Image (cartoon, rainbow, N blue to C red):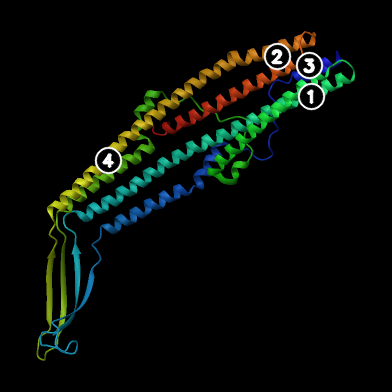
């Protein structure tokens, strides 16, 4: 009877075992996001690209660099290079090209549009990183919680083995009870190794964003999110989504390219002025001034314009496709958030209470000698597996909510 009371006390530990708080401050989701955004090369690259485009736009508004020419004219071929004639001249000239039409202004607008596109990509990438860090953090948090649950179950199995060993020594138990408890302990050990592997992968995913900080302790509770905005509101705001804004900016860049292609039909001009020294005595030096005009070929210009028009159409189709992708992602995430919530309610209302009631019934039967210890231990393991499933659903729903937060930033 004393053995059964001892085993009963060991088996009544089906409530979760909370671990002690770490001495260091736990790595919260907000902290992980802040670290990822502060030390992210991809964001710095986009910022530098935007600055480069802005500097380039300012330069495009200036006239092209002038050219200085040094030349010699009218050298006779006979006795070259020593021979000279009265018309032989050596001089210098200065040439400046002036782009035709509104090319300079459009090139400025094109650089600014490119800079705006990169800054839109920067804003969108920040939101992607916030979402992906949340996914990685929640994966690591869920794996850590699962390990704690299984470690608690193993502690109970060890207590049961100790109790069964004492009972065998006093003649009130059987070796079968020891082997049953030991077998379940070994199975839970294999399951724990599986969870440890999952935890290591999750930490590696988090380390992709925050480096060594990913190995820090995690809080016991996940972040609390309010309910998301209604699906209809989120769908209506997709055009303003940071990721989609970069597609709109790309279309603006393509529009400027089309306008610039139309201006290519307007010829560039150049002027040149020079001073030439003549060889002959009493011969006046020469001043030179000339104008030059490009002669655009209409067929070439038409092909160039057609190319830019098709490129703009391509960007528009990509934007429409991206909008569809965003909507599909939003609707999928919203559905997952709703359905996992319903499943969690089912776990709280039915699955877990039934599993606990089964353990209590088996404990009472075991105490009265109507069942075996193995049945009670198996029921205890079943409860832990149910709680692990519940934990997996909690992580899945939290990830879905983090994904919806990615869309809420469009408001």
For marks 1 and 3, give the CA distance.
Answer: 10 Å
Quadrant of the rendered image containing residue 282? bottom left
Residue 314's label in the rendered image is 4
Residue drawn at the location 55% of the way across and 17% of the way down: 345
Q: Quadrant of residue 98?
A: bottom left
**Please, is residue 69 above or below residue 363 in the view?**
below
The local crowd at label 3, few if under 14, some if 14 to 19, many if 20 or more residues have their Cα within 10 Å, is some
Q: How far apart are marks 4 and 3 (CA)?
A: 71 Å
> Of label 4 and label 2, which has the lower sequence position?
4
Q: Is mark 2 on a helix, strand or loop?
A: helix
Mark before the other along the chain sequence, 4 or 1: 1
Which labelled disc corresponds to residue 159? 1
In percent of width and height, residue 337 lies at 48, 24
Mark 2 or 3 closer to N-term? 3
Q: Is residue 21 above or below residue 287?
A: above
Residue linked to disc 3: 8
């Amino acid at each position: 009877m004393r053995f059964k009371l001892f085993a009963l006390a060991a088996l009544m530990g089906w409530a979760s075992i909370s671990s002690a708080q770490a001495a260091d401050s736990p790595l919260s989701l907000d902290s992980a996001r802040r670290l990822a955004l502060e030390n992210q090369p991809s964001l710095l690259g986009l910022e530098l690209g935007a600055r480069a485009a802005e500097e380039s736009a300012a330069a495009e508004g200036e006239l092209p660099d002038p050219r200085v020419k040094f030349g010699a004219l009218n050298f006779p071929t006979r006795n070259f290079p020593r021979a000279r004639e009265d018309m032989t001249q050596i001089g210098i000239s200065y040439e400046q090209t002036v782009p035709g039409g509104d090319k300079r202004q459009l090139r400025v607008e094109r650089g600014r549009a490119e800079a705006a596109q990169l800054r839109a990509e920067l804003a969108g990438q920040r939101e992607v990183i916030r979402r992906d860090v949340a996914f990685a953090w929640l994966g690591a948090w869920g794996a850590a919680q699962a390990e704690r649950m299984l470690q608690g179950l193993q502690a109970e199995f060890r207590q049961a083995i100790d109790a069964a060993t004492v009972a065998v020594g006093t003649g009130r138990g059987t070796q079968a009870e020891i082997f049953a408890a030991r077998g379940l302990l070994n199975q839970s050990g294999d399951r724990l190794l599986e969870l440890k592997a999952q935890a290591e992968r999750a930490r590696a995913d988090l380390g992709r964003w925050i480096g060594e900080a990913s190995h820090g302790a995690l809080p016991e509770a996940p972040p609390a999110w309010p309910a998301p905005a209604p699906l209809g509101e989120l769908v209506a705001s997709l055009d303003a989504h940071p990721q989609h804004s970069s597609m709109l900016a790309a279309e603006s860049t393509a529009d400027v390219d089309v306008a610039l292609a139309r201006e290519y039909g307007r010829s560039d001009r150049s002027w040149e002025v020079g001073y030439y020294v003549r060889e002959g005595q009493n011969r006046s030096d020469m001043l030179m001034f000339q104008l030059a005009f490009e002669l655009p070929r209409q067929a070439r210009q038409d092909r160039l314009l057609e190319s830019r028009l098709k490129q703009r159409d391509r960007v528009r189709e990509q934007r429409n496709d991206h909008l569809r992708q965003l909507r599909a992602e939003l609707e999928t995430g919203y559905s997952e958030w709703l359905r996992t919530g319903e499943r969690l309610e089912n776990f709280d209302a039915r699955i877990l209470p039934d599993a606990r009631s089964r353990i209590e019934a088996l404990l009472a039967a075991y105490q009265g000698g109507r069942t075996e210890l193995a049945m009670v231990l198996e029921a205890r393991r079943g409860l832990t597996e149910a709680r692990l499933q519940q934990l997996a659903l909690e992580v899945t729903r939290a990830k879905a909510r983090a994904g919806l937060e990615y869309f809420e930033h469009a408001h």
